Image (spheres, helix red, strand yellow):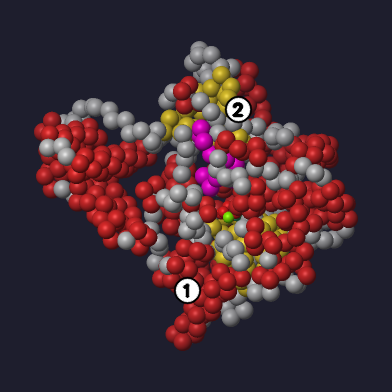
Amino acid sequence: MERNNNATAPAVPTNGKNEKIFRGVAAAPGISFGLAYVYNQREVVVRRTNIASEDIEDELRIYRQALERSEQELQKIYTLAKEKLGETLAEIFQGHLMMLNDPVLKEAIENRVRDKLNNVEYAVASEFEKYAGQLRDNANDFMYERIQDLEDVKNRLLRNLQRRRLTGTIEGGRIIFSRRLTPADTVLFSRYNVLGYVTETGGMTSHAAIISRSLNIPAVVAVQGILNEVHDGDLVIIDGYKGLVYLNPSESHLAECRKKIAEIENVTRKLEALRDLRCETTDGRVIELAANAEFVEELEYIQQQGADGIGLYRTEHLYLLREEFPSEEEQFLVYHEIAENMYPRPVIFRVFDIGGDKVLDSSAREGNPFMGWRGIRLLLDQPDIFRAQLRAILRASQGGNVKIMFPMISGLVVLKAAIDFLDGVKDELRREGVPFDEEIKVGAMIEVPSAVLVADILAREVDFFSIGTNDLIQYLLAVDRGNELISELYQEFHPAVLHAIRMVIESAHRNDIWVGLCGEMAGNPYATPLLLGMGIDEFSVIPSVLPEIKHIVRSFSFEEAKALAQRALASKTHEEVKDWIIPLMHERFPEFFTTTLT
Ligand code: PEP
Ligand code: MG
């Protein structure tokens, strides 16, 4: 995978409109320019067009695919609702399924496309409306609810129809504008070679932002009001370092943008020389510098960047992409490929961390999902899913370079339950004579504040810790990681965060286990000397920043880093730390910070 910018893209003429500049939160680095594509996933706007008779079959095929997808979604929601809410409430979704598959309605829609040559969105909207009209004529309370259900089913079907069509309409070189993007949207669009994402909502560590960074696609989030101004086809520049969006940019800004893209390529080339060097301080302390990964497609790029291993493989993307849990066999094939590809370097598979913002369907959402049925909590409640995943990981561990990690550990009981479950699965494999690595190492993510406070107790049960600052910061500071309204309060250098990290490192070392950090903070170059000086043993970062982090580590002595860490730990606020660390880093590494946001 290459760094995603478009230095070589053809010149695009400006359109004579006035330039407008918007500021948001820089969510994924990189600069690019291209034409806007406005993705409106909330309101379903139905346009009426007439199709040609030779397109009827294509149109009906799109309809059937959307129907199938809607059915799968509803089945999934129904199953989940039955478990969580009970049969009676879950029946709502059975009702939705029946409406979706109502033979009279289906036939009417198909006939409309065939006979009236209506586009299928319009046919669906009209026939559903007709049906709702009949119900309205017989209005009573029960009917009102049915009308609402009908509306939900119609919108689901329309969304799927438009999503299906969308992938066919995005030509390369577009920058996606949307109110919000789900992790699944982000992945879906990336397959169409998009050049950037701009959203009105979201924060730096929302999973959609993390995915953009993994995919090397610049992103700016929390750009208020942009959707009122931007139109499909407008020329835009996005600066994912500074969090800026230039709508209808001036010639001079376009020229500056091209120059910056060339500069970034230059720095990237220089850093390539570091690929085979160790991540080691000037006085010989060696740090494991691993990459975070979510897709098999990233492996080549991760190796090119010189990663010592994979410090966090977010397995839940297997689920998010397919919208259902993959079978043990499917998972085994993926895990095996990754372990083999990276061999002999280690790969840490984090078991499914579903929940929080990593759910697909809003109908299945909890009131407070980040504090809800998420990560290890969900898996312990779903033994079949957990078992299949652990079996697949264990089977892929034969080479000896695989490790397992549990997310959302909040205390000893949960951790022990997960380990006991793993032991049970190991026994099962032994009984079946299926080989796996008997020495496989197991780690806990430290991302819930309670785990920080009981880290000494947890450390006795596992082989390593990995600090998940993305969640730890949101829980510690009570700042939703995806909420743009309070993104200023999401502070990596807050003394509570720095002291929590130091406590975890000390607990780990007191108990003779190693400790890494795999949250986005590991890839923040301003934080590198501080974390290094606190004694972190491993960084796991997004692959694109790996050479930069290595360069920084190689420029400090451990002694100097320790002094900076002490200074940070003695600072009273996030702002105070930034006030001295940013100028210090800029002075020391002038060329690497020319484009980054301060
Ligand atoms: C974290 O919380 O820091 C982390 C690495 O996990 P995720 O971002 O997937 O929640
Ligand atoms: Mg997390």
Q: Is residue 288 above or below residue 245?
A: below
Q: Is residue 75 magenta?
A: no
Residue 366 as seen in the image, left or right of residue 340: left
Could you tell me if the residues under marks 1 and 2 are in contact, i.e. CB atoms within 8 Å? no
Q: Quadrant of ligand 1?
A: bottom right
Q: Choose between 238 and 183: the one closer to the eye.
A: 183
Rendering coords of residue 375 (x, y %): 51, 60
The answer to whether residue 296 shows anywhere in this view is no
Q: Dot 1, how many residues are within 10 Å of its Cα: few (below 14), some (14-19), or many (20+)?
A: many
Tell me the kind of residue under disc 1.
Arg
How many marks overall? 2
Residue at horizontal 35 percent and vertical 58 percent from the top: 85
Mark 1 or 2: the one toward you? 2
Inter-mark Cα distance, 1 to 2:
47 Å
Rendering coords of residue 281 (x, y %): 83, 56
Identify the residue position indicated by label 1 in the image.
391
Residue 103 as seen in the image, left or right of residue 356: left
Rendering coords of residue 314 (x, y %): 54, 58
Element class at badge 1: helix
Q: Which residues are magenta?
A: 197-208
Residue 305 as seen in the image, left or right of residue 285: left
Which one is earlier in the sequence, the residue at label 1 or at label 2?
2
Residue at horizontal 35 percent and vertical 40 percent from the top: 163
The answer to whether residue 106 shows anywhere in this view is yes
Residue at horizontal 80 percent and vertical 56 percent from the top: 534
Residue at the outermost front position:
141
Is the residue marked 2 within 8 Å of ligand 1, measured from its CB? no
Residue 398 as seen in the image, left or right of residue 332: right
Q: Dot 2, how many residues are within 10 Å of its Cα: few (below 14), some (14-19), or many (20+)?
A: some
Element class at badge 2: strand
Identify the residue position indicated by label 2 in the image.
23
